[in-house]
Image (cartoon, rainbow, N blue to C red):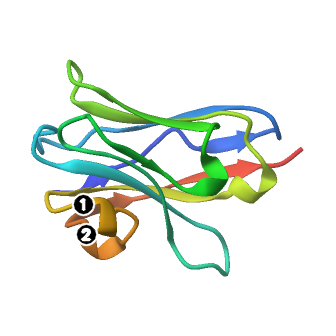
Amino acid sequence: VQLQASGGGLVQPGGFRRLPCPPCGLPLDVYAIGWFRQAPGKEREGVSCISSSNVSTYYLDSVKGRFTVSKDSAKNTVHLQMNSLRPEDTAVYYCAAGHSVITSNVASQSAYSYWGQGTQVTVSS
């Protein structure tokens, strides 16, 4: 199983981008879907997550109020809506799936079993 984030591209500061992640057959009511990003020269960091129950969400402090993660059950897809983008949001964005994600490990890569290729988001004027 390989997830495939898409929707990346070049966007101006203050702009927005919506990244879809179809979980490729993984049931969204069983797997939490997390979003991670990796900027050049930096470690990969957890950005957001939505629980399998669709009740809980997680956001990195620096994206709170700007990013929103949501599920489209009809399309079996998870989206990361990114608004008010900043140059420091520039990174390769990945989505990942895990079935043992809890509050204490939500931002840890080891909590997620399935990953895919990322999508580049560049915020620049």
Quarter residue 97 falls in = bottom left
What percent of the width, then of the height, locates residue 114?
22, 62
Distance of mark 1 from mark 2, alpha carbons? 8 Å
Q: Estimate how packed mark 1 is, as few (under 14), some (14 to 19) or many (20 or more) residues with alpha carbons within 10 Å.
A: few
Who is closer to the viewer here, 76 or 103?
103
What percent of the width, then of the height, locates residue 5?
40, 47
Determine the residue positioned at 68% across, 32% down: 16
Determine the residue positioned at 57% across, 43% down: 8
Which residue is disc 2 drawn over? 111
Determine the residue positioned at 35% across, 53% down: 34
Who is closer to the viewer here, 49 or 36?
49
Amino acid type, residue under disc 1 in the picture: Ile
What percent of the width, then of the height, locates residue 27?
10, 40
Marker disc for residue 102:
1
As displayed, is residue 123 above or below residue 77?
below
- Closer to the chain start, of discs 1 and 2, is 1
As displayed, is residue 95 above or below residue 26?
below
Amino acid type, residue under disc 2 in the picture: Ala
Determine the residue positioned at 12% across, 45% down: 26
Q: Is residue 59 left or right of residue 65?
A: left
Q: Is residue 74 left or right of residue 33?
A: left
